[in-house]
Image: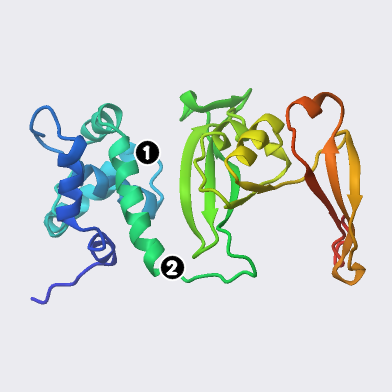
Amino acid sequence: MAHSNTVFRQLLQLLDRNEFARTERKGFRPKRRYRTLDRSGQFVAMMFAHLTHRSSLRDISSQLAPHAPRLYHLGVKGVKRSTLADANHRRQAGFFQELFEQQYAKCSRFAPRKRFRFKNKLYSFDASVVDLCLSLFPWAHFRTTKGGIKLHALLDHDGYIPAFLEITDAKTADVTVAKTLQLAPFSIVVMDGAYVDFLWFERLTRRKVFFVTRLKRGIQYTVRERRGINGAQGVTSDQVIVLAGPNSSKYHGVLRRVGYRDPDTGQH
């Protein structure tokens, strides 16, 4: 009988098992031998859950059970809900972060390059709230009747792949996670107005990191220089400014304030 290689198995083959084992030995070796579910099996089960949109640990276990005779092709066995719950609770999540960083390094070598007129590394940083059912995920309390988590992502525009991912509770402020970023000098990070924090901008400037964001209403500033503009490109103003008022002590450098009007929407 001919063997049929599933799409799921083909995806798993992209991960080098020897590399997986080396990562585990490097700093995540278990204190005692796994009895039923090793870390590889845990990874396969959770990857299956994400790709097939399973809603719970019980759902994962029940969906894997009918395929038990075929799971040996993936190097795993069926998994009980309680066993998977214990593994996710007790084992270090840092192992999978290390695994992600390894796979990211591989992807970055093959990702297509986006050419810009400047040589600086360009990133976009943003956060999205993922809604969760509060009765099913009481630990993810967000609002009175709503649960959720927040996914913070730094997108590398060379290849459009994420360079940083962090999951927090939905109440965590976007800028709190942004302050943990370690960006190389002369790189550029683009953000929305939720990330306006002039003390953090001061640290970025000292590290020679450029930032682009929206200026919040009510921010006081003084215009130092008015630069020429090309109205045909939608630019309405181009100014060099310094902060005034309470924020002047938080950021000591000069900033460039650019106004732009979208020709399609008319939004400024």
Frontmost residue, 151 versus 132? 151
Frontmost residue, 83 versus 195? 195
Residue in the picture at 32% in, 36% down? 94
Q: Amino acid at mark 2?
A: Ala
Residue in the picture at 47% in, 46% down? 164
- Point out residue 153 in the picture as x, y percentages from the top left corner: 53, 46
Q: Which mark is residue 171?
A: none
According to the picture, the residue beneath numbered tag 1 turns out to be: 56
Decide which of tag 1 and tag 2 comes sooner along the chain.
Answer: 1
Locate residue 166 relative to residue 83 in the image: left or right: right
- Point out residue 30 in the picture as x, y percentages from the top left corner: 14, 32
Locate residue 215 relative to residue 124 in the image: left or right: right
- Point out residue 107 in the picture as x, y percentages from the top left corner: 37, 62
Residue in the picture at 73% in, 41% down? 193
Q: Secondary structure at mark 1?
A: loop
According to the picture, the residue beneath numbered tag 2 turns out to be: 111
Q: As displayed, is residue 150 above or below residue 54? A: above
Please rate how many residues cluster around mark 2, counting C-alpha atoms within 10 Å: few if below 14, some from 14 to 19, many from 20: few
Distance, label 1 to label 2, CA atoms, is 33 Å
Q: Quadrant of residue 79?
A: top left
Locate residue 197 relative to residue 179 in the image: left or right: right
Q: How many labels sit on residues? A: 2
Residue in the picture at 20% in, 70% down? 5
Asked whether residue 117 is in view, the answer is: yes
Q: Secondary structure at mark 2?
A: loop
Locate residue 241 relative to residue 170 in the image: left or right: right
Q: Amino acid at mark 1?
A: Ser
- Point out residue 12 in the picture as x, y percentages from the top left corner: 25, 59
